[in-house]
Image (tube, helix red, strand yellow):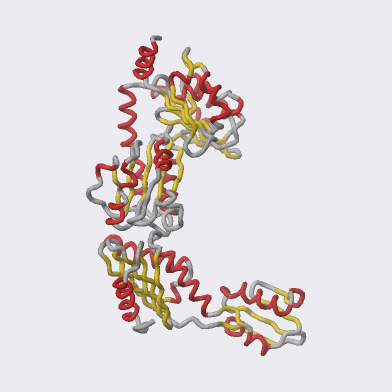
Amino acid sequence: MYDGGVYRSEELFEIIEDVGGVVLQKNRSSQMLTVIMSIPEEDKEAVSRVCVDIGGVVKDVPLAGTEIAVVGPTLGRHHMPHPICDIAEELRRYGSITVVMGMARGRGKATAQISRTEREIVDEYDAAIFVMGNFKSCVEAKADLVRDIHVPVVLVTGPQPEGIDDCCEAIVSGVGRKASRMRTPPERAKLEEIADTLEAVLRDKKRSLEEDPLFVHPSEVKQILENYEPIDMCLRPAPMVLHLDGLRIKIPYSEHREYLENVMVYGRRLGEVADISPSKIDDSSVIVRIKTRSQVRDEDLKAGR
Amino acid sequence: MEIEVTGDEQYGSDVYSKLFEEIMNDLNKAVLIDRVKLVLRPSVPLFVFSIALRAEPGSKSIADVSTVRMESTGVHVTITQERYAPDILAALWARYGRSNVYQQTRFDIDVTGAKESDMAEMIVSSGEEDRREIMGAIWRTMPEGIKNRRTLVDGNVITVIATEEILLPEMVQVGREVHESMGGAAVV
């Protein structure tokens, strides 16, 4: 990740292109610029040199190209403010795009619920972090909230719960409800532990994707779509967000479905090599899930292509 | 502020003791509280938060929270307790009109046509208001899912009994016992 000024940034984009790399995320705020890029390992030194030359700093961001949901039982002040925001901020430092979410009826031990729509929304992300409270019996009773989520889940709790290891990929204890920011060294170390745990969980997901690769890498689809005017003109921050297996495009599905389905990627229509659907949040975003090569081949065989 | 916590779970009890203290400090209510007793039984679930205030909240007049001096054209008020400044200003505006109330600095106000004796009668904060603020602070410290509450108020002791679904008589009894141990009346 490049973190620096806008001045001479075109030199950075040139070298990224020269070495065959891609820009995953570009975020400009006034005269400051953050660029998350993917480049070949052997060219890292050359790109770093350019970044330093133009007055910026380079950081390794292991969660680049992912979108993570940080979920609390509710968005009320009892659950929401400090630990959830601190965790989301830490994940952004690791290069991820984060979304903070609260459930409509997630409070209480016996009455906590998650709706099907909420589950489907969480499933749109690469992974989810569920943040729960300080009482062991409550955390254990609320394990059902994360049970039917299909994306990897990391559970962050106060005490270490027992008997719920099967409902999530990892558990990090020692956080819980807090009335102030996580500023002390042990708390910062805990935030790093959460981000490292998530990174390890996503590494497994990446490994399984490598075994059966996607038909096209999401960043290539992003490059193709970048010049599509509604995306180019979109004022929402990060109009295209990369996922490990696709991308979220922040333009209305109903208006742009036809274009997206017919855009050509390696001689194929995008609609043939990816599932394109409206986001479950609302119609203003599109979720593109790229099919794996074996899936595309299988569908081709069935269709007699 | 002395906090005593009894609970089913050691981790939760330790954290809630710290949370209670931090939230009360944030809301500037810690100075008003003498003793606190928290009963935390998440397995039931039953939560009893009982506090004994240093003094029973009473109503405050302008003379109680500021220095009042007679001058040739009216009264000069010097606010000594900053938290009441907005209330003092609002009360003076309501009684004398904005044109007669001139705020020289943050703490100094000139009131044209006023009498020193009137200031002793003008109430800027009732005890009820203080009590309500303290109750709000207690609710903020309680877990969010604990919606069914019964509040016992007696003199300077306030006890909140809370559970998630039906508040059973035995739960209220536990709350009453805690209330009594804090110095509250047996029947409230």
Provide residue A196's location: percent of width, then percent of height: 33, 40
Residue at 52% from the left image edge and 35% from the top image edge: A34
In this rendering, position of residue A193 left or right of residue B154 = left
Provide residue A226's location: percent of width, then percent of height: 55, 25
Provide residue A232's location: percent of width, then percent of height: 59, 28
Reply above or below: B12 against A196: below
Who is closer to the viewer here, B71 or B160? B160
In this rendering, position of residue A185 left or right of residue B103 = left
Quarter of the C terminus of chain B within the rendering = bottom left
Asked where in the image residue A234 lies, by quadrant, the reply is top right
Q: How many marks?
A: 0
Who is closer to the viewer here, A109 or A99? A109
Asked where in the image residue A119 lies, by quadrant, the reply is top left
Who is closer to the viewer here, A5 or B110? B110
Does the image show residue B28? yes
In this rendering, position of residue A168 left or right of residue A80 = left
Residue at 61% from the left image edge and 74% from the top image edge: B87
Does the image show residue A52? no
Who is closer to the viewer here, B162 or B106? B162
Residue at 33% from the left image edge and 43% from the top image edge: A154
Asked where in the image residue A41 lies, by quadrant, the reply is top left
Provide residue A200's location: percent of width, then percent of height: 31, 36
